[in-house]
Amino acid sequence: MFLEIDHLTMQFGGLIAVNDVSINIEKGEIHGLIGPNGSGKTTIFNVLSGYYKPSGGKIIFEGRQISGLSAHQITAAGFARTFQNMRLFKSMTVMENLLVAMGYRAKVGLWQEIFNPVAVHREEQRFTEKALELLDLLEVAEFANELAISLPYGHQRRVEIARAMATDPKVILLDEPAAGLNEIETEELRKILTNIHERGITILLVEHDIKLVMEACEIITVLDYGKKIAEGTAVAIRKDPVVIEAYLGKEGNQ
Ligand code: ADP
Ligand code: MG
């Protein structure tokens, strides 16, 4: 198995946010993770990306246990994510946001810049080209030199995905990427997800927009109160009475 969430539990004091959840994710899959507010979706992402150490269970990625590793080590293993509340560097340009994610500054020392400016320039060009290619994939290349904060919200969300891609991830975790987007922007996002998918990157998608999840995901896991209550294709999930009761039935109350 490519990515295995194995009996994962995450407890905060008396609250069990994730309760004995197991999910198997195949390489290259677009896997949806849905459930009402507070059902543990973001917490699973936080454990996957190394922000929390699980209270129980483990995560195995490409045969190696990664739960317990630091966020930095998990990034190095091939994980990238976006956040429910966007975390772009707003006072930087779009391009700078990507260059920082690629670790560009960290790789070029001051001495190198003084004594080997040609090599530094070449290095910068290589990073810039790669960033532009990703911005192009996300259809925001024309804004490369604009401040991130000056972009419309929907475009900022795409820049955030481009930035996550900049670390060359094998797995990308998207936490409600359609939040705040209108219908047209959401449809554009769906196409972008397909483009990312076609690059062979595995996508885990947490999303409230059920239509988007149903259209984009090959398989969907449903959570309720921290527990996995269902898993299957969009067609199967839509018909599952347990899901209708727990999730779709509550839609109006959220
Ligand atoms: P979702 O993303 O599905 O809306 P979350 O994973 O954010 O849900 O939250 C699941 C539950 O865990 C909620 O009850 C939330 O309040 C709680 N929770 C999440 N993170 C923490 C934390 N760091 N400390 C305490 N409780 C938390
Ligand atoms: Mg959440």
Image (spheres, rainbow, N blue to C red):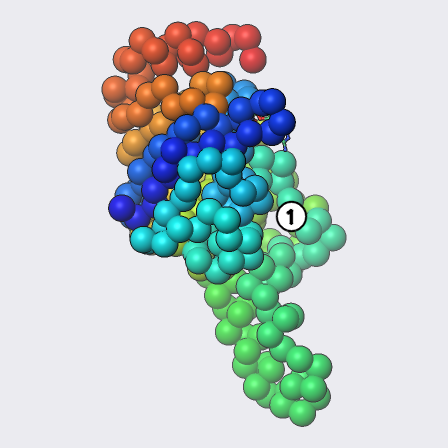
Residue 234 drawn at (x, y percent): 29, 24
Q: Is residue 131 visible?
A: yes
List the residue tagged with mark 1: 88
Q: Give whichever of 123, 103 is nearer the camera.
A: 103
- From the Cβ of disc 1, is ligand 2 less than 8 Å away? no
Q: In the picture shown, does residue 237 fall above or below 69?
A: above
* Three-letter residue code for mark 1: Leu
Residue 44 drawn at (x, y percent): 48, 35
Characterize the local packing of mark 1: few (<14), some (14-19) or many (20 or more) Cα atoms within 10 angstroms: many
Residue situated furthest bottom in the rendering: 115
Label 1 SS: loop
Number of numbered discs:
1
From the viewer's perspective, tell me whether residue 115 is left or right of residue 199.
right
Query: In percent of the image, x 60 and y 69: which residue is there?
Result: 104
Q: In the picture shown, does residue 116 fall above or below 9?
A: below
In the picture, the quarter occupied by the C terminus is top right
Residue 118 drawn at (x, y percent): 59, 88
Q: In the picture shown, does residue 46 fall above or below 253?
A: below
Q: Give whichever of 17, 110 is nearer the camera.
A: 17
Q: Give whichever of 21, 154 is nearer the camera.
A: 21
Residue 149 drawn at (x, y percent): 70, 46
In terms of image quadrants, where is residue 82? top right
Residue situated furthest right in the rendering: 91
Q: Give whichever of 78, 225 is nearer the camera.
A: 225
Query: In percent of the image, x 60 and y 29: which residue is there?
Result: 12
Q: Is residue 181 visible?
A: no
Q: In the picture shown, does residue 148 fall above or below 32?
A: below
Query: In percent of the image, x 52 and y 32: which residue is there?
Result: 10
Query: In percent of the image, x 46 and y 47: which residue is there?
Result: 67
